[in-house]
Image (tube, rainbow, N blue to C red):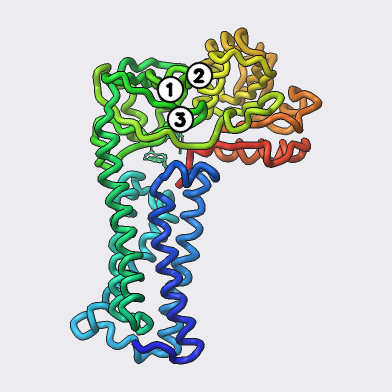
Amino acid sequence: MSAGRGFTWDFAMALGYAGLAMLGVQFALTARFRRATAPFGIDIVYYFHRYLAVFALAIVCAHYAIVRLYGPAALGSADPRIAPAYMTAGRLALLLFVAVVALALARRALRLEYELWRVTHAFLATAAYALALWHLLGAGGYLDSLWKEALWAGYGAFWVVLIAYVRLVRPFRVARSPWRVAAVRPERGRVWTLVLESPSGARLQFAPGQFAWLSLGVSPFAMREHPFSIASSAARPERIELSIKELGDFTATIKDVKPGETAWLEGPHGTFGVDLRPQAPGYVFVAGGIGIAPIMSVLRTLADRGERRPLVLFYGNRVWERVAFREELDSLARRLDLRIVHALLEPPQEWSGERGYIGREVLERHLPAARAQLEYFLCGPTPMTLAVERALAGLGVPAARVHSEIFEWA
Ligand SMILES: Cc1cc2nc3c(=O)[nH]c(=O)nc-3n(C[C@H](O)[C@H](O)[C@H](O)COP(=O)(O)OP(=O)(O)OC[C@H]3O[C@@H](n4cnc5c(N)ncnc54)[C@H](O)[C@@H]3O)c2cc1C
């Protein structure tokens, strides 16, 4: 294809290059580089990855549509036996990109198993990108000098190296530091706490509220890791506890894990937690169900540090018998200046605490007058988190003081 055929043609080509450049960046967005994700939070980076993919795909589709409308002759035959290989590569790349994005958006509706989807997603996206690069280098009427070709080939090679690092080098490093299951402790509400110790005495230095990817029963190369908040105190980095709620295929197996089994942790990740807001006059936590896990880490750590500032915990659950850690929370309340407000959806008859969902009225009843100065940490089901964010905004708490941890990214 030749360069410089007027504005529409040039625009279509520019869209192709821009779309491909953006799609390359997707590999970096999901590479979990701690320093790069820390300023935003890794969940936000994953959301950005999602929206950018849709935008980049729209740009690549526009590239194809404009050529189809204004220069169909340049497309030639769609028959792969006649068409140049780089054109077939371009067509295939477009189909694969559409499939990658469609599968990601429809995963839940299609009831695709998360891990199967994840592996398929990674392979299809890499194949689509390689095909698109082949198309660009083959068709590239704008790559009329060796330098320009080298630039795009180098750009493509960079992502290949990055993928190799993420899929091979990093798992290799994780595999070299195994952890051993020391105990599996049942908690209330179908939650199991996995206690991990390092046979070599290694430590996982983390900030309270952070999480790690856990591989259990499979090697770190298998792409079958799951993210879990670290629930234990950051003052004990040699003994890591993850509190896991039975929910699906993997989490249902935790109760059967035997002491002595090997586990691997990749992390820590995440920006949820009080250490990034050390100047606050006090902290408020709002947990729903297993959303208590990162908050347990924060409270245990604060207790170990001898924290004296006032703390309030709003903790929503369905029934009293299934309130995980409720006894330990009472003992933490004796070590800290901590007020606990339990809210139950199905309270027993004699219940004198809060009933129903945690909303504006519940918050208003228990928050101090100077509530706008406090820092808020929310973790629970998405509807709860959104409702509490709205309620806090209505109570005059600046959005910058409200921090939410999301357990459902995809
Ligand atoms: C930052 C973060 C911290 C979390 N902390 C905790 C915690 O402390 N305790 C706890 O019980 N749960 C936690 N979760 C949720 C936990 O990761 C999922 O419940 C678990 O991975 C579900 O796996 P499953 O096979 O049992 O369930 P499935 O039924 O297969 O999955 C249920 C949903 O969980 C998500 N999910 C499944 N597998 C993965 C995966 N490999 N990576 C990312 N998401 C996945 C998907 O949205 C899926 O739709 C956390 C999630 C995130 C993102």
Distance of mark 3 from mark 1, alpha carbons? 13 Å
Residue ranking furthest to the left: 81
Q: Is residue 192 visible?
A: no
Report the residue marked by disc 2.
324
Taking the spot 43% from the left edge, 89% from the top edge, the residue there is 4
Amino acid type shown at disc 1: Val
Work out whether residue 194 or residue 387 is closer to the camera in this orientation and state it: 194
Q: Is mark 3 within 8 Å of ligand 1?
A: yes
Q: What type is the residue that disc 3 sits on?
A: Ser
- Sequence-first disc among 3 and 1: 1
Helix, strand or loop at mark 1: strand
Pair 3/1: label in front: 3
Q: Are marks 1 and 2 in contact (CB under 8 Å)?
A: yes
Point out which mark residue 229 bears.
3
Q: Residues within 10 Å of mark 3 (few under 14, many from 20)?
A: many
Q: Which is more N-terminal, label 2 or label 1?
A: 1
Amino acid bearing label 2: Ala
Residue 154 is situated, as x and y percent measured from the top left of the image, at: 32, 65
